[in-house]
């Protein structure tokens, strides 16, 4: 009879729901010095004190129809700048040579090309880097701009225009 009463009490105790406010959290460090959290106490564990209201209620009916779980294509935003020459710089070279360098963020990847525009017109063909060496540029004011092209030749980024002045000694 006593056994039956003890078994009934044990069954009622185990079947009774645990209220979230009565749950305790314990923390300790394992042998690899990593923090371990548990609801079971240990000899070397400390109880974590939580603020009232920090309870997560689990729901068995979650409406996932409002969630957009379709894979999203990550678009990389490219930026291209002209580092050399600086805007309004005067280049003094009697041969009319100028070195132009640019920078691209994020890193340049295979398939991309850079087109240099000199005075609004494409200078040579697009290339796979952002360094250009121009020769025999006439005296006077010039503008340059760099365009970053994708695999299909579509412009995906453009630099701001840079104005420079080529100074060549006069033959007069």
Image: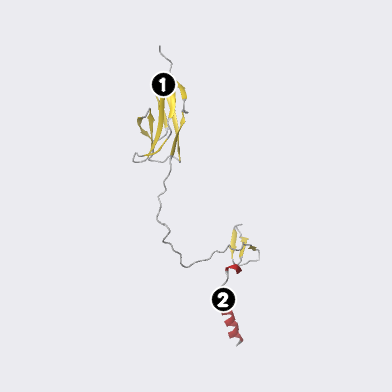
Q: Nearer the viewer, residue 168 or 31?
A: 168
Q: Nearer the viewer, residue 2 or 73?
A: 73
Check the image and name the residue furthest to the left: 152
SS assignment at label 1: strand
Choose top left, top right, bottom left or bottom right for residue 19. Answer: bottom right
Across and down, in percent, residue 152 comes to 33, 41
Across and down, in percent, residue 157 comes to 41, 38
Q: Nearer the viewer, residue 17 or 128?
A: 17
Choose top left, top right, bottom left or bottom right for residue 69. Answer: bottom left
Q: Quadrant of the N terminus?
A: bottom right
Can residue 146 be seen here? The reply is yes
Choose top left, top right, bottom left or bottom right for residue 94. Answer: top left
- How crowded pointer 1 is (Cα within 10 Å; few <14, some 14-19, many 20+) is rated as few
- How crowded pointer 2 is (Cα within 10 Å; few <14, some 14-19, many 20+) is rated as few
SS assignment at label 2: helix
Which residue is drawn at the image coordinates 57% and 68% (left, top)?
A: 20
Depth check, mark 2 against mark 1: the one in front is 1
Across and down, in percent, residue 155 comes to 37, 38
Q: Which mark is residue 67?
A: none
Which residue is drawn at the image coordinates 44% and 23% (left, top)?
A: 165
Report which residue position mark 2 lands on.
14
Report which residue position mark 1 lands on.
140
- Earlier along the polypeptide chain: callout 2 or callout 1? 2
Across and down, in percent, residue 32 comes to 60, 57
Please state if 8 lies on the left or on the right of 109 as rendered: right
Please say if the residues under marks 2 and 1 sit with CB atoms less than 8 Å apart: no
């Amino acid at each position: 009879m006593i056994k039956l009463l003890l078994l009934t009490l044990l069954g009622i105790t185990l079947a009774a729901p645990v209220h979230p406010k009565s749950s305790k959290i314990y923390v300790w460090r394992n042998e690899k010095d990593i923090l371990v959290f548990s609801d079971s106490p240990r000899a070397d564990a400390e109880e974590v004190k939580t603020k009232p209201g920090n309870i997560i209620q689990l729901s068995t009916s979650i409406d996932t129809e409002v969630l957009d779980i379709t894979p999203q294509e990550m678009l990389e935003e490219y930026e291209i700048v002209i580092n050399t020459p600086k805007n309004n710089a005067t280049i003094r070279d009697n041969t009319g040579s100028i070195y132009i360098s640019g920078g691209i963020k994020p890193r340049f990847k295979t398939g991309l090309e850079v087109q240099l525009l000199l005075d609004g017109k494409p200078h040579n063909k697009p290339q796979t880097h952002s360094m250009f060496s121009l020769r025999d540029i006439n005296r006077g004011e010039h503008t340059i701009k760099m365009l970053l092209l994708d695999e299909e030749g579509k412009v995906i980024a453009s630099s701001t225009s840079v104005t420079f002045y080529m100074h060549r000694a006069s033959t007069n």
